[in-house]
Amino acid sequence: MQKRRVLVADDIKIMRALLKSNLATYNCEVVAQVENGNEVIENIKKFKPHLVFLDINMPGKNGLEVLKEIKSQFDSIFVAMVSGHNTFENIKQATDLGADGFVVKPFTSVKIKEMIDKYRARREPVR
């Protein structure tokens, strides 16, 4: 089975490392790690990821602004929002903008697996 290409966008280095480590367990290759919302779209164009794990609070453009851009330009990309600020407003806004899932920090490997399973259910054909 082909590895799923993933872009991780989070301004905290340890969070990017934790996500990368967790994703490797589920046949995912982190093709890009960015710490600034302004870098996400250019890296999507360059690496063509299947999934994006996108933090809400980042320098440059915030994750909600970036989510809107992703969904308008690359609708087939599965986007899981990641945030320690899981307010009703953030979750609702992310959902309204087309987020495919929401991961609350601090996250567990179980929650990451749930997102991968959700991606697989929506995007990968059943054999």
Image (tube, rainbow, N blue to C red):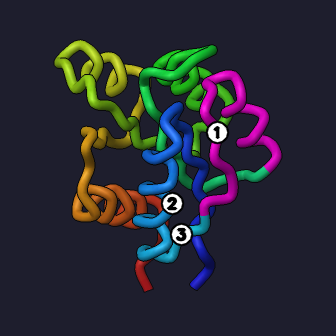
Amino acid marked by disc 1: Val
Q: Is residue 2 above or below residue 100?
A: below
Label 2, secondary structure: give it. helix
x, y percentage for residue 39? 71, 30
Disc 2 packing (10 Å; few <14; some 14–19; many ≥20): many
Neighbourhood count class around disc 3 (C-alpha, 10 Å): few under 14, some 14–19, many 20 upward: some
Q: Nearer the viewer, residue 1 or 20?
A: 20
Magenta highlight range = 30-46
To which residue does mark 3 refer? 28
Q: Position of residue 70 (x, y in %)?
A: 60, 30
* Magenta segment includes 39: yes
Q: Say which residue appears at 67% left-offset and 33% top-offset.
A: 40
Q: Quadrant of residue 95?
A: top left
Circle 3 SS class: strand
Mark 1, Cα crowd under 10 Å, few <14 / some 14-19 / many 20+, is some
Q: Quadrant of the N terminus?
A: bottom right
**Residue 108 location (% of width, % of height):** 24, 57
Disc 3 from disc 2: Cα separation = 9 Å
Residue 100 percent location from the top left of the image: 38, 41
Towards the viewer: 41 or 24: 24
Q: Report which residue position mark 2 lands on.
A: 20
Amino acid beneath label 3:
Cys
In the rendered structure, find residue 34 and report the number of the disc placed on it: 1
Q: Quadrant of residue 88?
A: top left
Q: Nearer the viewer, mark 3 or mark 1?
A: 1
105 part of magenta stretch? no
For marks 2 and 1, the one nearer the N-term is 2
Residue displayed at 39% across by 36% down: 81
The earlier-in-sequence mark between 3 and 1 is: 3
Measure the alpha-carbon separation of dots 2 and 1: 12 Å
